[in-house]
Amino acid sequence: MFTTLNYSEPESRRRLRQPSGPPPDDMSSMGTMSGVAITGGAIFNGLAGGNVDAIEGEIDTMDQCQAHASPTGQQHYHGLTPCAQSGFSGTSTTVKPGHCYDDSATDCVDDAHVWSRQGWTETSNYGGVYGIARDGHVIYGPYNGDGELWGCDDHDVCNGFFLPDQSYAYAATSTFPYIVGCWGPAPA
């Protein structure tokens, strides 16, 4: 799908990867999977079946990491997960987290967006890296460049923003579409 870099090309024409044909069939639209979290879990877009908000409409099917299985059995997130941070009390390498609706996790259902930020206490560097999108852009945590929660004016319609070095990245926000809303500009 991608050609090997030709290092005899002038510096100005080199790219990390150069497409050798049309994009994969489902890259021209959002598709379902939009990236991979640092946990190794799949990140799906913000929609559930029927084109409804997945976090608002399916929170009762999610575990305390705010993950659940797709109809085909693929475990995934639709937004930020507290389990990507070691400071979250529910993180374990041996025990699966309980359901959001468990008595001990009422905040998981009552305020899923606050719950998802547990453990994300470092506000510098956008909260840290959360994952990588299918288009190659980095996905950052829940804080903007000022160390505050992302506001709608802090990112574009794709849920992306430009870093100080002018590279493009996506933001993990508390508002729909949560991670990747559409594909941003191609990597330079």
Image (cartoon, grey):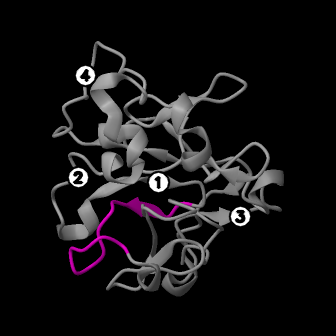
Nearest to the eye among marks 2 and 1: give it.
2
Residue 171 lies in what quarter of the image? Answer: bottom left
Residue at image x 19%, y 31%? 89
Nearest to the eye among marks 1 and 4: give it.
4
Q: Between disc 1 and disc 3, whose residue precedes?
A: 3
Residue beneath disc 2: 120
Residue 42 position (above or below residue 151): above
Tell me which secondary structure the magenta stretch mostly adopts: loop
Task: Tell me whether the residue at label 2 lies in contact with that at label 4, contact meaning CB atoms closer than 8 angstroms.
Answer: no
Mark 4: which secondary structure?
loop
Q: Nearer the viewer, residue 35 or 19?
A: 35
Give the image location of residue 83, x and y in percent.
31, 37
Residue at image x 36%, y 52%? 130
Residue 73 lies in what quarter of the image? Answer: top right
Give the distance between the C-alpha atoms of the residues marked 1 and 4, in whole angstroms: 23 Å
Highlighted magenta segment, given as a residue range: 136-150
Query: In the image, is 49 to the left or to the right of 7?
Result: right
Query: In the image, is 101 to the left or to the right of 77?
Result: left
Give the distance between the C-alpha atoms of the residues marked 4 and 3, in whole angstroms: 40 Å
Task: Tell me whether the residue at label 1 lies in contact with that at label 3, contact meaning CB atoms closer than 8 angstroms.
Answer: no
Task: Tell me whether the residue at label 1 lies in contact with that at label 4, contact meaning CB atoms closer than 8 angstroms.
Answer: no
Identified by mark 1, the residue type is Ile
Mark 2 closeness class: few <14, some 14–19, many ≥20 residues within 10 Å: many
Residue 20 position (above or below residue 115): below
Residue beneath disc 4: 92
Identified by mark 3, the residue type is Pro
Q: Nearer the viewer, residue 92 or 132?
A: 92
Residue 121 lies in what quarter of the image? Answer: bottom left
